[in-house]
Amino acid sequence: MIKTLTSWRGIFALCIVCFHFAMHEFDQMAYAGVTFFFMLSGFLVTFHHKHIASAKQFYRRRMWRIFPLHWLALTLMIILDLAIMHKFHYQWDLPLHVVLLQSWVPSEQVFYNYSIHSWFLSSLLACVIFTPLLLKFLQLSSRRVAWTAIIVACAAVAAVNITGTDSLRSYLYVCPLARMVDYSLGMILGATMRERPSSKPYSTIRATVIEVATLAVFATFIAAHASGNAVVAQLENSAMWWIPMSLLLVSCTLLHGSEGLIGRLLSIKPLVWLGEISFEVYILQKLVNNAFCYLVAPFCGHYGILIYDYSFACTLPLLIVTAWAVHKAFNYLSHP
């Protein structure tokens, strides 16, 4: 495990939750974080596992990671709606959400319906399903061919973002095919880093310089996004974050075991722990907030607080505790 990458998972997950609570100062980190999660998923597949010994075993592990948590969140959302909020708005698209196919439908009323953040799982599932095929392509192709293919794919996604309509860009944010480009870029980076010649450990000063330079590049992209430039805004959903997220993955991997001052700070146990439960934090955020608003807040005389409105300070501790408990429970069930 590369501790710094795990900690970045936790940091980005918290930024995404903050953004969803209408804290718009976190929007750059939130967009970057979503891209990071897809790229990291692909990166880890090839960096730690050059070959998949058994596609069946690979799918079993990934499906256990994705579906039980999704079904738990979706089921509890439905129960909460029916028992507490007395609403029944489930329509023809509910089966799509159950099997995580909603992100293939280009309609916000579908892919953002019900458990809204499960669109991520829908697109991630598509990436997982195509992973053996993508690995086969990497094994049969030279690195030059693989990099050429991913650069062409990235250029195509960026071009569609720049020339497309607002509704098309909105769909590209969740579209499994577009997110597969992020995932594939991560896979090629992972394969390239795995095959690099081993190097001597970096000194603390040199490692810190690399870390500061990486963060400086990231900050430059954040500043560009915050500038309000129209072209930059059209690329915000993934394309503009490929470079800084690639540098983040590469620098954390290169410095693994010889981190600088920033890396050592990122390696502290609380941040690593937060990264380990980041998946649960992301998926359970709406469920926990709704539960707080309609089960906890009434005892304080504030029944029915609007979702993501004025409840962040109370919801976040509850979310982290719930995510930790669910994480522990699933780990126990998979390794009793």
Image (tube, grey):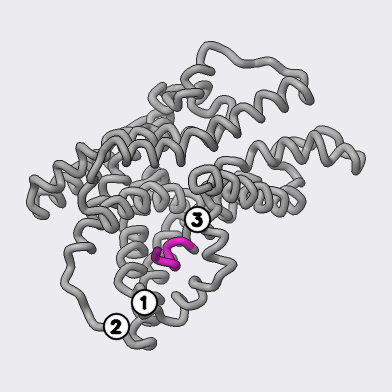
In this rendered view, identify the residue nearer to me: 334 or 1.
334
Whole-percent x, y for residue 21 in the image: 65, 46
Sequence-wise, the earlier of marks 3 and 2 is: 3
- Front-most of residues 27 and 179: 179
Mark carried by residue 257: 1
Q: Quadrant of residue 87?
A: top right
Q: Residue at x 39, y 81 (%)?
A: 208
Judging by the rendered image, the residue that carries numbered circle 2 is 201
Which residues fall within the magenta stretch?
1-6
How would you rate the neighbour count of disc 3 (Cα within 10 Å): few for under 14, some for 14-19, many for 20 or more?
many
Q: CA distance from mark 3 to mark 1?
A: 26 Å
> What type is the residue that disc 1 sits on?
Gly
| N-terminal label among 2 and 1 | 2
x and y, in percent, of residue 294 in the image: 80, 34
The image's mark for residue 234 is none
Helix, strand or loop for disc 2: loop
Q: Nearer the viewer, mark 3 or mark 2?
A: 2
Residue denoted by label 3: 29
- The x and y percentages for residue 68 are 52, 34
Q: Main secondary structure of the magenta part?
A: helix
Residue 153 found in image quarter:
top left
